[in-house]
Amino acid sequence: MKYLHEAFMQSIYAIGNSDPNPPVGAILVSNKNKIIGSGYTQVYGSHHAEIMAIEEAKKNHGIDSLIGSTLYVTLEPCNHFGKTPPCTTAIKKNQISKVVIASLDQTDKVNGAEELRSSNIDVKLYNSDDFKDELLWTLDAFHYAQKNKKPRVILKWAQTSSGWLAPMSGKSGPISNAFSREAVFRIRKLFNSILVTPGTVLSDRPLLNSRFNGSFSLNLKNENFLLKSLSAFELNYPDEYRKNIKRFIMLPRLDKNWNENDLKEYLNLQASLEGSYFFITDDPQQEKLMTSWGFNCFVSDYSDISGILNYTYKMGAINLMVEAGPSFCKHFIENSVPNLLFIFKSRQEQWGKGRGFFLSFDAAQNNENKIKESGYIKLYNIQLNTDELQVYQKK
Ligand SMILES: NC(=O)c1ccc[n+]([C@@H]2O[C@H](COP(=O)([O-])OP(=O)(O)OC[C@H]3O[C@@H](n4cnc5c(N)ncnc54)[C@H](OP(=O)(O)O)[C@@H]3O)[C@@H](O)[C@H]2O)c1
């Protein structure tokens, strides 16, 4: 279990970079019970996690160190030629004698476990329940997206002690504390794509990147795999890996609050950032204008969330973090769209009266009731100094 857990820790570095391949991690342990190699899936077309671990062991400990070793891998090794040769061939060729697998690959063409067994390699396969927590933050999104042809959706918001998500008008400014904001930058690294909704673009002009420089200590207690992953980003995160993040931006309609200049400025800002960006509008005039400037845009009715999610999947979204204002949060939750919720609850009061999901004075209670009624169960409460992060999952 210990080595497989280490393999899962490796796999978080592949999230957002290995697409469309799954983010997998691997650890190679010698017959003297010493870790000799580790690795995670590289960019599409390059090495899988198993090969990274094998190559590292060869380089640092010599080819003989692999004889009789055990490979721990988070997903069943592949047994087919894709962009790279089968991992099972490398396992056999290097005389690895045991392979411990945390979860089976559900795609038909894989069958790596069977192939290894038929070559007299000892294969131990765990039940996915044994690594429920690890799988939730790594491979589950990949399997979900592949099965449902849409990304797994994570909705995130911050609320004041009264439950307000925004002031009655204009930009909300920071609601949560510095610890929560740091956590958000790290959480963004656990997803390969982000979607932002129109009212939020209008008021905040969000950059949607991860402005984390590793200098801030969150001092998280490593109670679960989510927290362990967030802490790991502080110690060792290859920053270049964020280059592949996909930002989906639902634009406000052209009107007196959002004119051609605002649009042009925001398009140029997004184009100057790393990663890819995709614009969505429900305003055909806006689409025409953008096309004339050389920007692509998907036109969709904003109430057609399923059409928008299909589009994001086609463009490569696997796990999609949604950053929305109160209108879209309500719309998403009422339609049971998000698979997971991240709610940052501040103890601070702000604005007197603001906007929750409902315009009422007991917003905090209303938000909680709405979440439960819509079929979400709480997974964890995480204390971030004075704030509390609550994580919910759809039943
Ligand atoms: N607390 C947080 O975590 C957080 C996060 C993001 C933003 N914010 C704050 O939230 C505020 C913006 O909130 P918001 O509710 O106006 O923005 P929003 O949820 O980002 O977008 C809502 C807007 O989208 C349009 N829309 C079109 N179809 C819709 C549909 N089916 N359902 C809902 N909206 C639809 C609406 O325009 P029409 O009314 O013209 O149709 C509506 O004004 C800002 O103050 C921002 O700073 C807070």
Image (cartoon, helix red, strand yellow):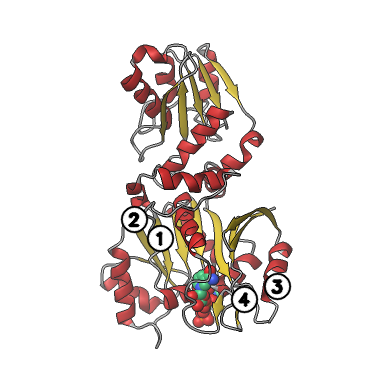
Q: Which of 315 and 256 is in front in this view?
A: 256
Which of disc 3 and disc 2 is earlier in sequence? Answer: 2
Q: Do the residues labelled 4 and 3 touch (CB within 8 Å)?
A: yes
Q: Is residue 88 above or below residue 224?
A: above
Secondary element type, mark 4 = loop
Q: What mark, if any, has residue 275 been given in the picture?
A: 2
Q: Is residue 42 above or below residue 110?
A: below
Q: How far is the residue under mark 4 from the one under mark 3?
A: 8 Å
Instruction: Compute the Cα span from label 3 to label 1.
Output: 30 Å
The alpha-carbon separation of the residues under discs 4 and 1 comes to: 25 Å
| Horizontal and vertical percent position of residue 287 | 36, 73
Is the C-beta of the residue carrying label 4 under 8 Å from the nearest atom of ligand 1?
no
- The residue mark sitting in front, 4 or 1, is 4
Location of mark 4 (residue): 356
- Report the residue marked by disc 3: 366
**Mark 2 or 3, closer to the camera:** 3
Which residue lies at the image location 53% right of the left edge and 71% below the top edge? 175
Give SS at disc 2: loop
Q: In this view, does 339 lie above or below 68?
A: below
Residue 49: percent from left, percent from top: 42, 31
Residue 274 is drawn in which quadrant?
bottom left
Which quadrant would residue 14 be assigned to in this image?
A: top left
First in sequence: mark 4 or mark 2? Answer: 2
Q: Position of residue 71 (x, y in %)?
A: 48, 22
Front: mark 3 or 1:
3
Judge: label 2 CB < 8 Å from ligand 1. no
Residue visible at 41% across and 63% down in the picture: 208
Determine contact: label 1, label 2, CB under 8 Å. Answer: yes
